[in-house]
Amino acid sequence: MRVDEGLEASDRAIEIGERTGARALSASATLLRGVLLKLKGRLGESRDLLTRAYATADEDNDTLVAYYTVTNIADWTEGYVAGSGHLYRRELEKARFAARARSAPASCRTSAAPSAAVAASTRRRPSVRRQMASSAA
């Protein structure tokens, strides 16, 4: 994966979105940049961008960006364990997500509690917990 090139491209896309008022572009690019920063281990910066992307997506009722930012905050950056699990639960309870889930093929639906999946994933990533603790300090 070419993370540095992705960071440059996402930065340009954010700038274009902000300059032209294309909020969906800006939110998507901010989400992408947050994920790429996470891959580089820059978890504090990543979380800030993911939080910003979520705020925009939530205001604009953008189901996909909202969902992917929340899952990144709550799962990949260990935010669920660090107290952000409420974002994950809140997003799953929103009408926009319920409507999207009903239209998904049955094979894509799950009745498993999100916290169980998150808990399982956090057990596999002790290095991420250490990084989160050090970036929060």
Image (cartoon, grey):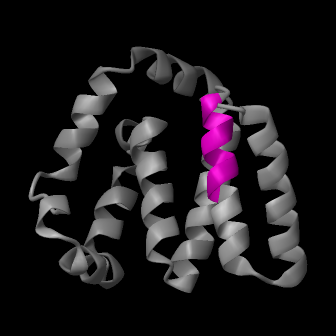
In this view, 87 is above or below 21: above
Visible in this render: residue 137? no
Total residue callouts: 0
Question: Which span is picked out in magenta?
Answer: 31-39
Whether the magenta-drawn stretch holds residue 114 is answered as no
Q: Is residue 92 left or right of residue 50?
A: left
Q: Residue at x 34, y 50 (%)?
A: 85
Image quadrant occupied by the C terminus = top right
Image quadrant occupied by the N terminus = top right
Query: Measured from the top left, where is residue 4 in percent x and y?
Result: 79, 34
Secondary structure mostly taken by the magenta-highlighted segment of the chain? helix
Q: Between residues 31 and 126, which one lies in front from this camera angle?
A: 31
Visible in this render: residue 79? yes
Query: Measured from the top left, where is residue 121 in percent x and y?
Result: 29, 31
Image quadrant in which you'd find residue 44? top right
Query: Measured from the top left, where is residue 127 in percent x and y?
Result: 47, 15
Image quadrant in which you'd find residue 42? top right
Q: Residue at x 81, y 84 (%)?
A: 21
Q: Between residues 112 and 105, which one lies in front from this camera angle?
A: 105
Q: Residue at x 9, y 59 (%)?
A: 111
Q: Residue at x 32, y 28 (%)?
A: 122
Q: Is residue 98 left or right of residue 75?
A: left
Query: Measured from the top left, where is residue 67 in percent x and y?
Result: 42, 63
In this view, 52 is above or below 81: below
Image quadrant in which you'd find residue 96? bottom left
Q: Is residue 6 left or right of residue 61?
A: right
In this view, 3 is above or below 47: above
